Amino acid sequence: MAQYTLIKMLKKEFQAKRQKALLTLELLTESPAGIGDHSTQDFYNNAIEAINALAEADDVLDTIERYYGDNNNRFTQNNT
């Protein structure tokens, strides 16, 4: 049961990171006036950081799904 709780926590953690990255990219693309006091380099760095965070979150969530998803649940496989 502890393994299930850990995987559930990891999934929620990376879902939150994905949403944060998507929000950051949305703000950068749709509300650039909100970052007017920053340099162009800051803008680019923020965009790069957000897209890297999004890619990492998606990769981790894909990995969790691959190894611990409903169709490939290691918890139920260990009990059979």
Image: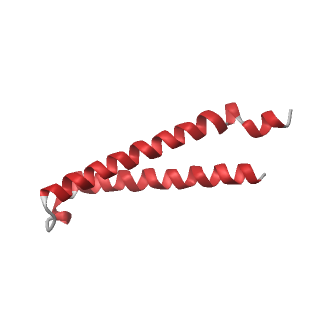
Q: Residue at x 35, y 46 (%)?
A: 52
Residue furthest right as drawn: 80
Q: Nearer the viewer, residue 65 or 39?
A: 39
- Relative side of 65 to 78, left or right: left
Where residue 7 appears, as percent x and y from the top left, is 65, 49
Where residue 56 appears, as percent x and y from the top left, is 44, 44
Colouring method of the image: secondary structure
Q: Residue at x 20, y 51 (%)?
A: 44
Q: Is residue 13 above or below residue 63?
A: below
Quarter of the C terminus within the rendering? top right
Where residue 6 appears, as percent x and y from the top left, is 67, 53
* Count of marks, rendered view: 0
Q: Nearer the viewer, residue 57 or 28?
A: 57
Residue furthest bottom as drawn: 37
Q: Residue at x 46, y 46 (%)?
A: 57
Q: Residue at x 73, y 49 (%)?
A: 3
Where on the picture, by quarter, is residue 38? bottom left
Where on the picture, by quarter, is residue 65? top right
- Relative side of 2 to 23, left or right: right
Q: Is residue 37 above or below residue 51?
A: below
Where residue 18 appears, as percent x and y from the top left, is 44, 50
Where on the picture, by quarter, is residue 20? bottom left
